[in-house]
Amino acid sequence: MADDFLSQPINRATAVRPTFVLIAGRTAAQGCGISEGKAGETYTAETTRLQMAPEDLERLGLRPGDRVRLASAAGQAEAVVAAARPGELPPGVLFIAYGDVSSRLMGADTHGSGMPDSKGLDVTVEKLG
Amino acid sequence: MTAAEQQQASCAERTVVADAACTFCGCVCDDIELVVQGDRIVEARNACVLGKAWFLSHAAAHRPACLIDGQPAPVEEGIERAARILVQARYPLVYGLSDTTCEAQRKAVAIADWLGGTVDTTTSVCHGPSGMAFQSVGEVTATLGEIRHRADLVIYWGGNPAESHPRHFTRYTLMPRGLFVPRGRKDRFCVVVDVRRTKSAAAADLFIRIAPRRDFEALWTLRALVKGVTLDAACVEAQTGVPLDTWQQLAQRMKQARFGVLFFGMGLTMTRGKHLNSEALLALARDLNQWTRFVAKPVRGHGNVTGADNVVAWTTGYPFGVNFSRGYPRFNPGEYTAADILARGEADAALIVSADPMSNFSEPARRHLARIPYIALDPQETPTTRQAAVAFAPAVYGIHTGGTVYRMDDVPIPLRPALESPNPSDEAVLSALEQRVRQLRHGR
């Protein structure tokens, strides 16, 4: 999968690349932020922090702290890019803590299960500003 | 009084609540020592980082007990307004329940029953698909105590307990010395399977990174190997992102374990395949019992989400997504589950108990919830409480109020509150609401 992903062309003007796979999940900081209050800095910062493999950052010309627009088939949301720990994410896979951003990208269809697809979403990334 | 005397007096006021239970996550660690000073918890000994944040933050929260349309109001007025909203609705939804006591959960189910509405819990957007899989495959299970004393092979699949359940390793699965694993960690082998090399992977002896959205294929590969089926190596690697040889070694290790356990997280239930992923894992654990003892356990998130499953199941016969509109309970995920009911625009009123769908649901579901009158119970201010017609800020369970919660392995645990609160408990609010709903709807 990584090889397929890396062979895709890059539009450097917009840093647009299709078919990133976004994983949303829990983090310790997000959990602490829930208790401290969802309007607080801990929760807000953690749930808008998009983790990306360092290789992807470099190839897309992004730097930690850059703002990006994530778009899925269901919606779009803005996030702040951060470098994932080396080796944590393979190229083409993104991670963000559960929160408003991940929910906005989630579709409403649950396929008869009650659970919308919340992990493994196809998204695009576009650099802002 | 001198500064030294003040400090001495301050120290003298400290009391310790022993064996308190933490209700932040499904571990429900019941060995917490809470140090109380005045009306605050100043220390939560033995608690993990999440538990400390839970105890130290929630104890400080003091919000008006009731808001009607955003304005402080007497609780009695809030109950009246809430009851009238619910009885006037044609399709009311009761949702949430995973962060409150079993006693309060019973009342919420009763309200849905009197209303002829629907009750659903946060399980439906957590391990609801696993609940469906339990019904089709069954669950070979064990308590965390049994796992602590017996498990020599511990596998985490699609979960990251190092961040979501920080004491899972140390209290229940990897580190403890057990009756049949006397050397603790040295007697156990740990495998983490995930698409990310999470912090949990650092605790494992073996990390297997599978390709995203390939859990189903990977689990069926293992099922086949355990059964002795010959597989094509190129096909397996293409489908799972992992060489066949790695799966063969893992399958062999699973069959040779004396007591194995598969813990699984929402990496399975929230990914394409959902209940079919959970079914594959549960079936794998079942298959392995032809060779050894093997169990499977979902790792549950909220403090009493397991209690919600139990209470809804023992009161209605079904674990979540239950509709009473015909006068008897019906269960149908996708039809009677909150994410669907709201996204389709069906519910015309809602009672949200200790949940935050305004943060966690899809955009269509959120838009519809914002259009209908609803009642929210939550000790904290959230995007859901902000838009509620009636918002109650009840006392915090496990900190201000007692009651019963279920640990993730279905073991009930009593709560030992450390503080008093001027605000009523969830149970008190829901009891009063149930009584008023019954009077208005049924005249008794």
Image (cartoon, coloured by chain):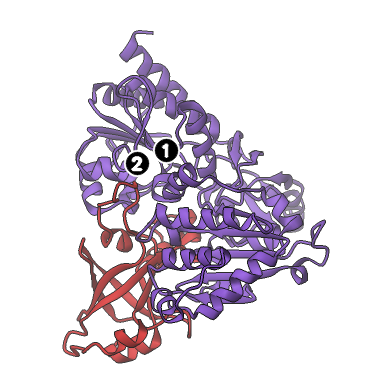
Chain colours: A red, B purple
- The C terminus of chain B lies in quadrant: top left
In front here: B53 or B406?
A: B406
Q: Please give left or right for residue B343 compared with residue B82 in the image.
A: left
Mark 1 crowdedness (10 Å alpha carbons): few <14, some 14-19, many ≥20: many
Asked if badges 2 and 1 are on one and the same chain, I answer: yes
Question: Can residue B318 be seen at all in this image of the molecule?
Answer: yes
- Residue B121, given in percent of the width and then of the height, sits at 41, 40
Q: Please give left or right for residue B169 compared with residue B389 in the image.
A: right
Looking at marks 2 and 1 on the same chain, the residue that comes earlier in the sequence is marked by: 1
- The residue at which mark 2 appears reads as B333
In front here: A74 or B420?
A: A74
- Residue B370, given in percent of the width and then of the height, sits at 23, 43
| Chain identifier of the residue bearing label 2 in the image | B
- Residue B410, given in percent of the width and then of the height, sits at 60, 42
Is mark 2 in CB contact (under 8 Å) with mark 1? yes
Measure how far apart labels 2 and 1 are at the Cα level.
8 Å
* Image mark for residue B320: 1
Q: Residue at x 45, y 48 (%)?
A: B133
- Residue A79, given in percent of the width and then of the height, sits at 30, 72
Q: Please give left or right for residue B282 compared with residue B179 in the image.
A: left
Count the marks: 2
Disc 2 element: loop
Disc 1 element: loop
Name the outermost residue toward the top. B443
Q: Residue at x 53, y 43 (%)?
A: B306
Q: Residue at x 48, y 84 (%)?
A: A87
Query: Relative to B154, is B298 above or below?
Result: above
Query: Relative to A95, is B115 above or below?
Result: above
| Chain identifier of the residue bearing label 1 in the image | B
Q: Tell me the amino acid under the disc marked 2.
A: Pro
Query: Relative to B422, is A5 above or below?
Result: below
Q: Tell me the amino acid under the disc marked 1.
A: Phe
